[in-house]
Amino acid sequence: MQVVQKYTQGMYEHGLYPDKYICHQKQNNFVEIEDPKTGKRQTVLTFCTNDVLGLVQNPQVQQAAIDAILQYGTSNSSCSVLSGRIDLHRQLEQEISAFKHLPHTQLFLNAWMAMQALMDAFCHLAIPVPGFQHTRETLIMTDVLNHGCIVSAVVNADNRSGKVFSYSPPVRVKPYRHCDADDLARKLRRYAKAGDRILVVSDAVFSMDGDIAPLPDMIEVLSQYPDSVLVMDEAHASGALGAKGGGIYDHFSISTQSVIDQGINPLIMTTFSKFAASAGAAISTHVKELVDLLDVSPTSIGTISLPAPTTAAALESIRQVRSHPELVQKLQANNRYLRSRLIEHEFNAIGETNVIPVILPPDYDPKAFADHLMEVHGIWVSPIWYIAKPRLRITANALHTQEEMDQLVSAMVQTRAALYSTPVTATISA
């Protein structure tokens, strides 16, 4: 433990360890928080929640979770193949399949497990089947800025449970430039071999830059590779993109069936922690056999199924989204308004979604900036200071009013003036 202790002490000394506040109550976007170091409490206006449609406090969603506890209890205490599923699981899978226009869906406790289960199952299959020999290698192409759950899963794709317990052919993982379909095409020409099983995986909306994957161009590239698989992680796209919040396919007006007709297998990962006021994730596909395979993968068998209240909250949230597209329209309008106001005041607000990263000049300290916003103005944003481009990560949601967004922008202008005598005008860049 000496290495761990020495390393962590360095994090503390250099101000790299993040502040962790304790939340006591929430009303709309106002949260009462406590600084555990001092015990000080204050109510702040938050711009760092992922509750993008404001459904966490929706009465129907809350009641659905309460009713589920009363009917099923707080936990299922096992996996579905050992002790069965509750009917809410089936209903949620059907609701997601209808929402994503893919007929088969498998639930998971979180996105990390969903992505790992997919890589395990696709690359290594599952239990040995008499008379079947797995001989084809897998080539995985991944965007260099993909979320950590994707990175973790693909890095481990050649070294997981299927590989441990039975022979599987090699898995090769290659990155391509961020949102660059031309580079994806070049890398496929370079690395794909005859007989390879090809899987391309990307965030639909990138959680740090707030930009959108070039789905039409990616489909065009993969149309040259029959039976290839295209995985979209829609964690930040569901409920946020498209006229009705359907996600990246809705955003580009592309039907999943048209992709299937081109010989490509579209897979969508949906998560419930952003738009669906809950927790958990799901993989949707048009191939029933893949869902059956996911169901018997070690990642599914070795854990519990989604608890009833979590399932019920996600189910009711998706129904709310599908019934109230005006929530999505309000979110998108708030995103446009807040980003335009930030740019108007010479902040480098990049991206194009409700995730609004503000890239700061090199001599600005994001943590100091965020601390000043909270202590002086009572506004909570997320500082990101330990990656290549220091930034404030701001998230707009459907509950924010124009007055609240104006309050944020005004506070940021005042903070810039208070901390930096000569404000630096950043060049707007994607």
Image (spheres, rainbow, N blue to C red):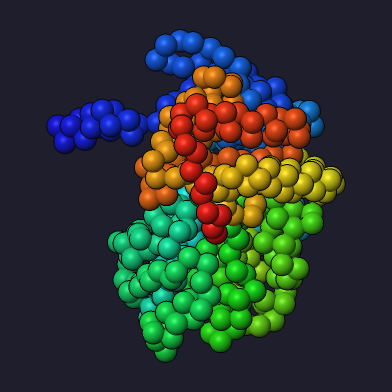
User: Is residue 251 something that shows in the picture?
Assistant: yes
Q: Quadrant of residue 231?
A: bottom right
Q: Position of residue 287 (x, y in %)?
A: 62, 70
- For the point 62% across and 70% down, which residue is it? 215
Q: Is residue 329 left or right of residue 49?
A: right
Q: Position of residue 203 (x, y in %)?
A: 54, 59
User: On screen, 187 above or below 370?
Assistant: below
User: On screen, 114 above or below 196?
Assistant: above
User: On screen, 105 above or below 266?
Assistant: above
Q: Position of residue 190 (x, y in %)?
A: 39, 84
Q: Nearer the viewer, residue 40 or 161?
A: 40
Q: Is residue 224 left or right of residue 360?
A: right
Q: Position of residue 408 (x, y in %)?
A: 64, 31
In the image as oriented, which residue stretches furthest toward the left? 2
In the image as oriented, which residue stretches furthest toward the top? 39
- For the point 74% across and 53% down, which residue is it? 245
